[in-house]
Amino acid sequence: MSNVASSVALCLLSCVAAALSMGFATSKAVDAVARQPEASGKINSVLIMGLALTESTAIYGFVTGLIMMFTLG
């Protein structure tokens, strides 16, 4: 495997980590709403903010991988 391919694979690890953390955060939010349904509005707003920040990390990693693929490869 070339250096470019391994570099792109490392960049895309952020996408995998983001997907795992988003699943973990969503499961915890569902558990929290199941325990305290009256706090669902606040839990949902915090969850959406956290998911947006996590998704932006995945997008940055994906774009960095694309840039590396097309400029170095």
Image: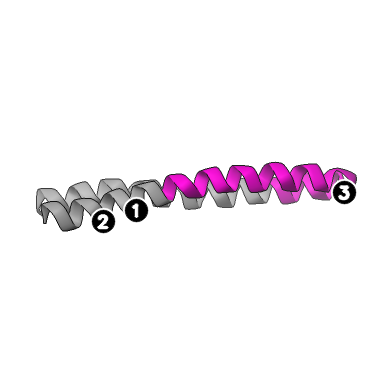
- Relative horizontal placement of residue 20, taking residue 67 as reference (left or right): right
Q: As rendered, which of 53 and 28 lies closer to the eye?
A: 53
- Cβ atoms under marks 2 and 1 closer than 8 Å: yes
Label 1 packing within 10 angstroms: few (<14), some (14-19), many (20+): some
Q: Is residue 55 magenta?
A: yes
Outermost right residue: 38
The residue wearing badge 3 is 37
> Mark 2 — residue?
66
> Circle 1 sits on which residue?
62
Percent from the top left, x then y, of residue 46?
Answer: 69, 41
Q: Please give the range of residues in magenta.
A: 29-58
Q: Quadrant of the N terminus?
A: bottom left
Q: Is residue 41 left or right of residue 19?
A: right
Q: What crowding class fits label 3: few (fewer than 14 Cα within 10 Å), some (14-19), or many (20 or more)?
A: few
Q: Earlier in the sequence, mark 2 or mark 3?
A: 3
Residue 20 percent location from the top left of the image? 50, 50
Q: Are marks 1 and 3 in contact (CB under 8 Å)?
A: no
- Callout 2 amino acid: Leu
Give the amino acid at mark 3.
Pro
Q: CA distance from mark 2 to mark 3?
A: 42 Å
Quote the CA–CA distance across marks 2 and 1: 6 Å
Q: Quadrant of residue 35?
A: top right
Q: Nearer the viewer, mark 1 or mark 3?
A: 1
Which type of secondary structure does the marked residue at label 1 adopt?
helix
* Magenta stretch secondary structure, dominant: helix
Disc 1 marks which amino acid? Phe
User: Could you tell me which quadrant the C terminus lies in?
Assistant: bottom left
